[in-house]
Image (cartoon, helix red, strand yellow):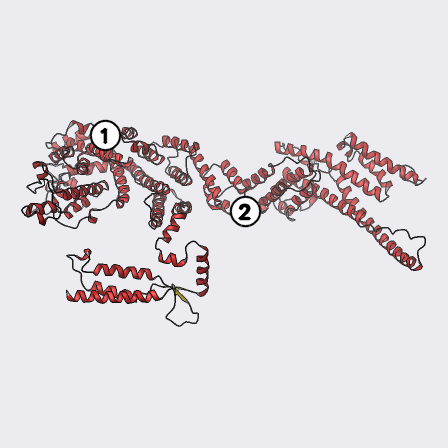
């Protein structure tokens, strides 16, 4: 003992010296002990060491309450000294330290405070609540679906779903454990219910699919088997009957799977409850009662004396037989033990409950829980049983021990009576009720929907097995009460009872979406489940993660051939895709869009692409669509058409045709059709339609920008799709070797090129004519000096030179712009914006008919405009004779341009031509421009 005290005193002095050293070191930074060129700094939290030493000091203090009556080896004390040599520092560079210090000055907590305050991290976590962010599950489920894509791997997929949910729950609970809160977030509850539902799907449908390989006995097989056994004098034990039921009856296996599922779910929740080991060590039963009975003469030696008369005997039945209580502390311990034993039974761990009873010094409780085991004498086994059990081995001289309880039916009746005895603790009664099928007692302690369903399923399975054993086993059984047999109801009635439960919590939970889905899965009523899901979708009560769950549940049903009501399944997937669109991840969106019907695939993915503006992001979206085998060509076409059809109303106050944001969106949408070489024909088609819209609204700049979107090699790319023709523009527009759409698209594109070139040429001519013309000189004053006259003559000569240069340039510009304008008026093969007549045998679609109408309107708008521009060019350049020739062109039957003019516009044109004729006559020429 002296050695222990000396060691403790040495430890105290060491701790004091260590604390003094830390007190002198005010900064949390210290120089590293090693001499390194980089002069790295070390960040050390001394609080953890101090805390460890304080705990070690308290743990090894012989005078502390924790050490009373206990002895520990000296090695524990030596380990405390070894803590002094631990270096738990974190090495940081100088710039990292500066960043930390700068960040700490801006925050409410300084870094020193955070180091000293162990709850700072928890406070930050609590403020941000990162455990509510479960977005990782979207990608986890996607990865699982991509890896396990075949129908043979369907249950591997479900297993991965379960693991994904479990891993996420562990992460969430790990973060929540750092926060001082007892509240369970809705996200955690929802995810746990999802994980439980995937477990149910896994076990139920694996059994149902495998059960197709089992033959189900007829209803009257029970009596036939019993009569056959009596004739053959075979031994049929209770265990054999139970084994055969589980092998041949799929519904019995399913009942047990449902029970196992609920017990597994309860096991996940068991850690939330305190264990008995937290309150007592392995000891004898009722120790306080024993102490008071042994020292009843000297009451002063009893720390907690009971003033009430206690039992005089210590056998298990003494409290009930004598009608006297145990010591209050023992009653409290018994109540805690019984509740924990029930929790273990509820979790399917009956052996753990028995071990717990033995741990608390009450082995009779463990022994009483063995009476439910079916009886079997292996010494009477017939050949069939030996064949079914390969591990069965017995020599002819040995005798094997009997299994189970020969008087099981009598034990069961006693358990029934015990479960109804109010003198026994409620949870202890419920344990026996679960083993004998007393439903009403189990429902009294049921606090949740799963607890109540577990009680019904335990009872239902117990009755089914009991009835089968009494029908097949040749022996006398103790009769069970009538109330026992009345609890045999169908699964459908079980859920009706849950919906009408007296417990309001159970009634409320019965209508929750998770439990409704579990209900229909257990009943295998997929059509009704789909109707329930449709109602959830219609009222928009599904959060993103619940939609994720429903979508993958629909995929599972489709893989196993249970795809009832595809319309509802598509509605679920469509709702999920809308959620993914908000996340803006093209890989997720494309993968799940591919699960929709073809039409919905195109419309929904196109609606998503309409929102994408960045070029690189557009490439990613198209790559994801290709990976998911979506119809990319139809999607991109719909994107362009949809954007082009928006914001088509023009501002009536905009007379200049200014370029708007909506116009730029329409123009930039053409990029969707340029990514693929095979879509150049469609790109030209859509560009032509957009140019028609712009020209109709007199937006030349917008039309030019749309035209410039088309790559220069687009026509050549279209040619490569028709390798049988000669690669010339003439053949492209004038032969039957090209499809009607391709030929008309290329021709229309060339028409717009001609028109836009003409407009651009006129703009250049107009700019040079009005802005490039030299400015005339001012008149020289009458009394100008000689110097001013010389300067004037010099400027005049420069002006004449510039004027000649301008006239020469204008002649070239005029010649070029006249050619461009005449190209529009004299466009070959029918005229400008007139399709070739070589493909008239093909019927026109409504889209093509609308296009033809628009082109006709454009001809009426643009050709008169081009005519006036051409006349103004020739008139300004004093080429009035050619203005007269313009009248011949307009009146020519070869071109029939007069047909596109309205009477008023045609009158204006000829009026200007008449003015040119008058000017010619003033120049001593005839009205047609010929000299007299």
User: Can residue 252 be seen at all in this image of the molecule?
Assistant: yes
Q: Position of residue 249 (x, y in %)?
A: 24, 35
Sequence-wise, the earlier of marks 2 and 1 is 1
Give 474 or 488, whichever is nearer the viewer: 488
Say above or below: 596 vs 805: above
User: Can residue 737 be seen at all in this image of the molecule?
Assistant: no
Q: Are marks 2 and 1 in contact (CB under 8 Å)?
A: no
Mark 2 element type:
helix
Give 698 or 81, whichever is nearer the viewer: 81
Q: Specify the quadrant of the image occupied by residue 794.
A: bottom right
Side of 225 relative to 553 (left or right): left
Say above or below: 262 vs 96: above
Distance in Å between CA atoms under marks 2 and 1: 63 Å
Q: Position of residue 678 (x, y in %)?
A: 58, 45
Disc 2 versus disc 1: nearer the observer:
2
Side of 395 relative to 594 (left or right): left
Q: Residue furthest left?
A: 297
Q: Quadrant of the C terminus?
A: top right
Q: Residue at x 93, y 58 (%)?
A: 785
* Label 2, residues with CA under 10 Å away: few <14, some 14-19, many ≥20: some
Q: Position of residue 60 (x, y in %)?
A: 21, 61
Q: Look at mark 2 in the image and give the residue it sits on.
A: 618
Q: Which mark is residue 218?
A: 1
Mark 1 element type:
loop
Question: How many numbered callouts?
Answer: 2
Side of 346 relative to 377 (left or right): right
């Amino acid at each position: 003992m002296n050695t222990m005290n000396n060691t403790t005193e040495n430890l105290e002095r060491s701790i004091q010296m260590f604390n003094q050293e830390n007190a002198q070191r005010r900064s949390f930074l210290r120089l590293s002990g090693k001499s390194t060129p980089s002069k790295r700094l070390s960040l050390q939290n001394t609080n953890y060491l101090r805390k460890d030493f304080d705990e070690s000091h308290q743990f090894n203090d012989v005078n502390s309450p924790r050490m009373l009556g206990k002895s520990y080896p000296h090695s524990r004390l030596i380990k405390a000294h070894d803590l002094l040599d631990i270096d738990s520092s974190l090495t940081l560079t100088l710039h990292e330290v500066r960043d930390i210090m700068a960040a700490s000055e801006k925050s409410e907590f300084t870094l020193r405070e955070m180091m000293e305050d162990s709850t700072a991290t928890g406070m930050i976590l609590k403020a941000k609540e990162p455990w509510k962010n479960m977005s990782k599950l979207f990608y986890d489920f996607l990865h699982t679906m991509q890896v396990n894509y075949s129908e043979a791997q369907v249950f591997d997929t479900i297993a991965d779903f379960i693991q994904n949910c479990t891993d996420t729950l562990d992460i969430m609970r790990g973060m929540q454990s750092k926060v001082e809160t007892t509240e369970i977030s809705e996200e955690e509850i929802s995810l746990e219910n999802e994980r439980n539902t995937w477990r149910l799907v896994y076990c139920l449908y694996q059994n149902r699919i495998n059960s197709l390989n089992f033959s189900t006995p007829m209803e009257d097989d029970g009596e036939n088997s019993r009569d056959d056994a009596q004739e053959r004098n075979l031994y049929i034990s209770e265990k054999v009957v139970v084994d055969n039921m589980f092998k041949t009856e799929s519904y019995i296996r399913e009942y047990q799977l449902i029970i196992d599922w609920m017990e597994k779910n309860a096991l996940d929740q068991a850690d939330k409850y305190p264990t008995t080991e937290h309150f007592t060590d392995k000891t004898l039963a009722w120790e306080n009662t024993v102490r008071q009975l042994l020292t009843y003469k000297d009451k002063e030696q009893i720390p907690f004396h009971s003033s009430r008369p206690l039992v005089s005997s210590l056998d298990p039945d003494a409290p009930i037989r004598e009608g006297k209580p145990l010591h209050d502390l023992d009653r409290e311990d018994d109540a805690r033990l019984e509740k924990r034993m029930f929790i273990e039974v509820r979790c399917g761990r009956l052996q753990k409950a028995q071990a717990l009873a033995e741990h608390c010094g009450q082995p009779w409780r463990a022994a009483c829980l063995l009476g439910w085991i079916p009886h079997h004498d292996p010494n009477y086994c017939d050949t069939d049983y030996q064949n079914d059990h390969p591990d069965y081995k017995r020599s002819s001289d040995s005798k094997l021990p009997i299994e189970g309880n020969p008087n099981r039916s009598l034990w069961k009746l006693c358990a029934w009576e015990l479960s109804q005895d109010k003198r026994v603790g409620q949870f202890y009664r419920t344990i026996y009720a679960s083993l004998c099928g007393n439903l009403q007692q189990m429902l009294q302690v049921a606090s949740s929907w799963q607890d109540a369903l577990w009680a019904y399923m335990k009872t239902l399975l117990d009755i089914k097995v009991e009835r089968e054993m009494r029908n097949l086993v040749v022996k006398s059984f103790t009769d069970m009460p009538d109330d026992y047999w009345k609890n045999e109801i169908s699964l459908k009635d079980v859920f009706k009872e849950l919906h009408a439960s007296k417990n309001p919590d159970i009634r409320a939970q019965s209508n929750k979406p998770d439990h409704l889905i579990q209900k229909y899965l257990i009943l295998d009523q997929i059509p009704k489940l789909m109707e329930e899901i449709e109602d959830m979708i219609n009222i928009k009560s599904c959060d993103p993660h619940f939609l994720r769950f429903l979508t993958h549940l629909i995929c599972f049903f489709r893989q196993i051939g249970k795809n009832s009501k595809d319309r509802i399944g598509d509605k679920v997937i469509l709702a999920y895709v809308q959620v993914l669109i908000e996340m803006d991840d093209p890989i997720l969106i494309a993968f799940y869009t591919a699960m929709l019907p073809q039409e919905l695939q195109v419309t929904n993915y196109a609606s998503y692409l309409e929102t994408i503006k960045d070029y690189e992001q557009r490439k990613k979206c198209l790559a994801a669509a290709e990976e998911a085998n979506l119809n990319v060509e139809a999607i991109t076409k719909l994107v362009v058409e949809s954007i082009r059809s928006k914001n088509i109303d023009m501002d009536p106050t905009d007379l200049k045709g200014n370029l708007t944001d909506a116009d730029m969106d329409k123009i930039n949408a053409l990029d969707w059709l340029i990514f693929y070489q095979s879509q150049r024909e469609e790109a030209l088609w859509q560009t032509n339609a957009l140019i028609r819209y712009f020209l109709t609204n007199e937006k030349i700049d917008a039309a030019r920008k749309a035209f410039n979107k088309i790559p220069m090699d687009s026509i050549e790319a279209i040619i490569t799709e028709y390798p049988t023709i000669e690669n010339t523009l003439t053949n492209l527009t004038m032969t039957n070797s090209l499809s009607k759409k391709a030929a008309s698209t290329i021709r229309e594109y060339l028409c717009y090129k001609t028109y836009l070139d003409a407009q651009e040429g006129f703009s250049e001519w107009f700019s040079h004519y009005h802005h490039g013309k030299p400015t005339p000189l001012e008149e020289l004053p009458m009394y100008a000096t000689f110097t001013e006259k010389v300067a004037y003559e010099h400027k005049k000569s420069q002006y004449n030179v510039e004027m000649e240069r301008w006239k020469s340039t204008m002649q070239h510009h005029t010649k070029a712009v006249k050619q461009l304008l005449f190209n529009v008026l004299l466009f070959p093969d029918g005229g400008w914006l007139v399709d070739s007549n070589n493909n008239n045998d093909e019927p026109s679609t409504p889209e093509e008919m609308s296009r033809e109408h628009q082109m006709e309107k454009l001809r009426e708008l643009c050709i008169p405009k081009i005519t006036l521009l051409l006349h103004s060019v020739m008139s300004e350049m004093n080429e009035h004779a050619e203005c007269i020739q313009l009248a011949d062109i307009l009146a020519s039957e070869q071109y029939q341009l007069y047909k596109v003019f309205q009477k008023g516009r045609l009158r204006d044109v000829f009026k200007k031509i008449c003015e040119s004729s008058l000017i010619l006559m003033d120049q001593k020429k005839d009205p047609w421009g010929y000299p007299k």
